[in-house]
């Protein structure tokens, strides 16, 4: 399949565990310039993500001063239906224009990226190329941008990988002054719509944590499944946010 340049698993000392136990966890990565749609489907189904040519998966993390259990998420598109609040987000942005096309990073998108950084309090990225390759439309796989405009003004952009039977969100950004529009959720809804148009089965919308976090909005999509690192994909229910595996 795909051979990595360097893959490792290691023990993870949990600072918030009074017994200071060593917990075995997955931390694997490799670098690859190109992957086929079928290979991308295979990797996503095993919990892998990528930023540019750097592929990774990890089952635990230290974040916000504590131990976090990572939950890869995906939406079974046959089971998705928008919630009432998601329908409101769609209605709130009915006046906007959505353009979906092969990804091309220009100065307008770079400027939006840097304005969007105002939201970050830690782990602030240096560049949009922390997430995308220099040729994002084709490397390491096909990628399309979902751009949202108010007239000619770019308000939001998200970047969607295209596999054979699946799609996967890479990164999203929006105009901070337009936060009341919930443009992050809106572009996710557009990604789901486009994924269905492509005939895909799954939409992978990234990592969240089993513990409560700022990423919990990713758990609010009907048809969401999470990846159990021991047993594979399972339907997500709200109780999963606090239970330990």
Image (cartoon, rainbow, N blue to C red):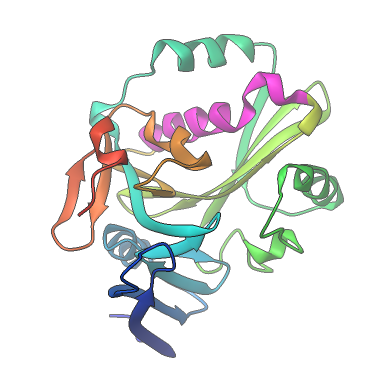
Q: Quadrant of the N terminus?
A: bottom left
Which of these two is toward me, 194 or 215?
Answer: 215
Question: Is residue 64 in sight in this rendering?
Answer: yes
One can see residue 237 in this view: no
The residue lying at 31 percent from left, 70 percent from top is 19
Residue closest to the eye, 174 or 103 = 174
Left or right of 85? Residue 224 is left
Q: What residue occupies the far front of the structure in this picture?
A: 18
Q: Which quadrant holds the C terminus?
A: bottom left
Viewer-proximal residue among 73 and 93: 73
Going by the image, does 138 lie left or right of 10?
right
Left or right: 175 as drawn, with respect to 225? right
The residue located at (24%, 27%) in the rendering is 79
Answer left or right for 22 relative to 130: left
Q: Which span of residues is magenta-colored?
A: 178-197
Residue 5 location, x and y as percent? 44, 90
State how many labels appear: 0
216 over 117 or under it: above or below: above
Q: Residue 177 location in percent, x, y?
A: 81, 27
Quarter where residue 58 is shown: bottom left
Q: Quadrant of residue 157?
A: top right
Q: Is the residue 77 above or below the residue 90 in the image?
A: below
State yes or no: residue 182 in magenta. yes
Q: Is residue 31 above or below residue 166?
A: below
| Residue 24 shown in magenta | no
- The residue under the point 51% across, 29% down is 190
Main secondary structure found in the magenta portion: helix
Among the 4 quarters of the image, the one containing residue 216: top left
Q: Residue at x 32, y 61 (%)?
A: 47
């Amino acid at each position: 399949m795909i051979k990595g340049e360097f893959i490792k698993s290691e023990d993870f000392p949990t600072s918030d565990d009074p017994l200071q136990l060593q917990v075995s966890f997955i931390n694997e990565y490799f670098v690859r310039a190109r992957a086929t749609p079928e290979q991308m489907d295979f990797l996503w189904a095993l919990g892998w993500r990528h930023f540019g040519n750097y592929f990774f998966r990890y089952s635990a993390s230290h974040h916000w001063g504590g131990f976090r259990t990572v939950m890869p998420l995906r939406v079974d598109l046959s089971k998705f239906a928008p919630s009432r609040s998601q329908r409101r987000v769609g209605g709130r942005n009915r006046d906007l224009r959505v353009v979906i096309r092969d990804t091309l990073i220009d100065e307008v998108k770079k400027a939006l990226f840097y304005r969007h950084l105002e939201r970050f309090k830690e782990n602030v990225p240096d560049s949009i190329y922390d997430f995308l390759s220099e040729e994002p439309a084709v490397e390491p796989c096909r990628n399309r941008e979902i751009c949202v405009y108010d007239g000619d003004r770019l308000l939001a952009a998200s970047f969607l990988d295209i596999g054979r039977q699946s799609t996967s969100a890479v990164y999203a950004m929006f105009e901070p002054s337009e936060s009341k529009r919930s443009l992050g959720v809106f572009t996710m809804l557009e990604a789901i719509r486009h994924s269905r148009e492509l005939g895909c089965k799954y939409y992978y919308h990234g990592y969240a944590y089993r513990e409560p976090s700022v990423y919990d909005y990713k758990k609010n999509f009907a048809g969401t499944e999470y990846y159990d690192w021991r047993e594979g994909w399972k339907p997500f229910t709200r109780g999963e946010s606090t239970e330990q595996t």
